[in-house]
Image (cartoon, coloured by chain):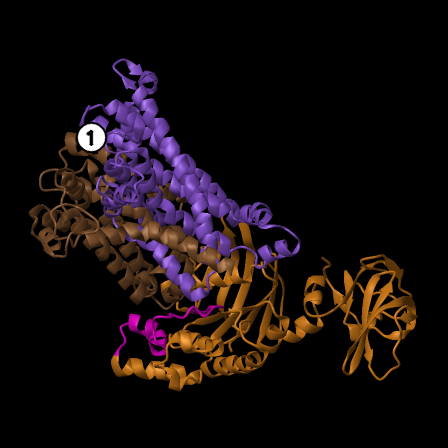
Chain colours: A brown, B orange, C purple
Amino acid sequence: MTQKLYTWTILSLVLVFLIGPFLIITAASFSAGDTLAFPPEGFSFKWIVKVFTVESFRESFVTSIILAVGGTLTALILGIPASYAMSRYKLPGAETVRFLVSLPIVVPGIIVGLALLRYFVIPLGISISLALFVAHTALVLPYAVRVVSASLNNLRSDMEEAAVLLGSTRFGAFMRIVLPNIRGGVLAAFILGFVTSFNQVPVSLFLSGPGVRTLPIDMLGYMEIVFDPSIAALSSLLAFFSIGIVFAAERFLGFSRYV
Amino acid sequence: MSDAPYLSLEKLTLAYGKSIAVENLDLTIRKGELLALLGPSGCGKTTTMRSIAGLMPVKSGRIVLDGKDITRVSANRREIGLVFQSYALFPHLSVFENVAFGLRLQGMSGAALTEKVDTGLRTVGLSDFSARKIPELSGGQQQRVALARSLVMKPKVLMLDEPLSNLDARLRLEMRTELQRVQKESGVTMIFVTHDQVEALALADRIVVMRNGVIEQIGTPEEIYNKPASSFVADFVGFENIATVVGNKLVGSAGEVTCPATLPNAAGLAWRPHAVPLGSGPYRGTVRGVSYAGSSREYVLETPLGPVKTEVDAALPTHQIGTELAFDLPPEAAAPLRKIG
Amino acid sequence: MFQNRTEALALALPAALFAAIVFLVPVAILLSEGFRTADGWSIQAYIDFFSMPLNQKVFLRTLRLGLTVTFVAAIIGYAAAYAIVTLPPSSKGKMIGLVVLPLMISPVARTYAWIVILGRTGIVNQALMTVGLTDGPVRFLFTETAVFIGLLQLFLPLMIISLISALENLPRDAVPAARVLGANWFQVFWKVLLPLTREGLVIGGTLVFTGSLTAYITPAILGGSKVLMLETLLYQQVTVANNFVSASIIALILILMSFAANILLRRIASARNSK
């Protein structure tokens, strides 16, 4: 009995600490008052509605979606062949390749953003949008390689050999045999990459300019100026958005198997 | 079966990086033959098979198939089939689509394709399974699909990697007959790789025994079984008593004995347990182990040569452990070996 | 394993080159700025950097926060992970899901919630005043405590998950066996649990420590300019002071600490694989 008491005391405390703030901010976003407060003053949807009317939120939301989708797709296009080379070939310099593609996990994002701004955007005249896109692609690359590699390593390589012996080219075998069988892993990598890129802040800090701003950066700027529940409303909307994606992925894919 | 060589391996050397797996291998295979590559793991048999298929680059030497040098021909154009040990079926495709895979790549479709696939599935007795998914099949059925998938391509040579090792004992017998039937019906030249001498002896027209990347002996099952060329082959096919011949002495693992009879001109001699008479003969040994095996009883004797195994009729009275007995190693009942070690 | 090297390189090169051009080259140039002077290379900038009290303070604070967050996360994480692995399988899965859930939520959203809780009119202050512990609101926001709480909430799930997988790999009945042999709970923890879960602890610790060191959002929102950490200092140096030399030095410090932690992590992971 004491064991059970211990278990539930600890777990409720930890959950209150981890999930509680999220519930409070959700409640606060339904406030009818004009200042951020908990318990909320009255109940209304006005702040939720307001989020959708703020022009810059709409723009930066679209920017973030494009970045997350485009960056993750590009990372997969680069990462899948690299993972395939590392898992199926005797790749010269495999360790160097592994090191290079895992760099974005080790190097803090803020440094990358600054470096790109200072040495690419300013001197070479590369647009901030492109730099942002490249930075987000690089950021997602390690996750893409990790998840896809895990899927590839779970797939027996003699299937490709069998396809080749039946007359297929190596590329054909990859498209017809390998890709359909690692589909789940690729989708999981996409979702993981999307969520990572969408929520990312440090890499985008220095890479914003007029009209180019990701949603989290926009929120950071907005909350310094405005102290009403709209950021709370947006935060809870975003939380539900991310959770919704991950839940759907888990439901239809068994997402957690791959991550 | 014609006698002209159909597939020849000429001075074939294969290597993984710097480590040589197969060295200077010469081997010819006749059309329609059923050949076994037999040897313990690491002997180079699988590597040899993979190089014939084009999955393993050749370091030096040639592979000639049907009069054409295919050493540098890529695997997808060699017209060689391979049934993998794991079967390597495509789990996302149905049985039908697995068998149709290669035919579709040749551009075949419609009624012609369906007919060919159906024929292939009928050959292996899986006519009713074409719509099934691969994970729904048993191991034995999966192997038949893999066999059909290779057969419908009408390969010049069909190779099988350890075809019976993943099956249980009953299925193994069934598949053995099945493989022989399919081979005789289709007339395809077949090479299979195995570490199991019983399988090789039962199935093959000819057996190639390999060891450490070189061929130890090539022969019919009868030749391999009765006249092993070396102590390695003898040991592999069940000659449990092997001795080196030095002058008129027999040398074993523990020591030597002098043979009263004249020894033949051979490097060594090998006896199966039933060829070692117990109770009479010039040598003496102490019983160290007895085991009952139905119609016979096996004894392990401790002798000056080392342990000697004999097998006698179970109807004879049992000797207790510790008893000292006479036994014989008659040269005329032994297989002469050309090579020891 | 295919043997064709050209094919292998052709497949791997785009990703490797991309990472090299986007990451390695610009970051290397940035790092070199801290050592470059008008007349050659020198470490003078580093000496200057570390002789400034503000920089010393921020550096030590970042280290201190990283270590305390890791330490507290380890203690809470242990208690939580042990409670979770003892649950029946059905509720265990759900509980793990609830612990992982916050990781999917935008850190900006998660951190912002603390403003509602710790603000002047936040719940904590309301509670304190209702109970009568204080007369006026206590300042929590823009203190080290707020940053500490924010970081702990952000990274605790990583520690719990690492410890859960370590505890699940524990040999069955190791704990009951130790109990039967007469160990008390403290001895069970110290002599059995801790040595057997050291790996998970180190993995979780590395994730929490590097996460805290390189956090930007939490110190930015909850610390502001009063409680700078290395990343917020870097941002300030660039945007306010236009000081790229300082930025370069901070970048190197961050990368070195992050690298060191990751190498440690990889060592442990490979030691486990080679077993």
Residue located at (35% from left, 57% from top): C98
In the drawing, does residue B326 fall left or right of residue B38? right
x and y, in percent, of residue B331 in the image: 83, 69
x and y, in percent, of residue C3 in the image: 42, 52
Along the line of sight, which residue is nearer the eye, C33 or C217? C217
Asked if one can make out residue A148 in the rendered structure from this viewpoint, the answer is no
In the drawing, does residue A41 fall left or right of residue B282? left
Q: Amino acid at mark 1?
A: Arg
Residue located at (55% from left, 51% from top): B20
Quarter occupied by residue B54: bottom left
Q: Residue furthest front?
A: C132
x and y, in percent, of residue A124 in the image: 15, 32
Along the line of sight, which residue is nearer the eye, C197 or C87? C87
x and y, in percent, of residue C80 in the image: 44, 52
Query: According to the image, label 1 marks what residue?
Result: A118
Indicate yes or no whether the magenta region holds residue B148.
no
The vertical placement of B6 against C252, above or below, is below
The vertical placement of C221 against A30, above or below, is above
Mark 1 Cα shell of 10 Å, populated few (<14), some (14-19), many (≥20): some
Q: Residue furthest top?
A: C39
Asked if one can make out residue B230 in the rendered structure from this viewpoint, the answer is yes
Residue located at (38% from left, 70% from top): B91
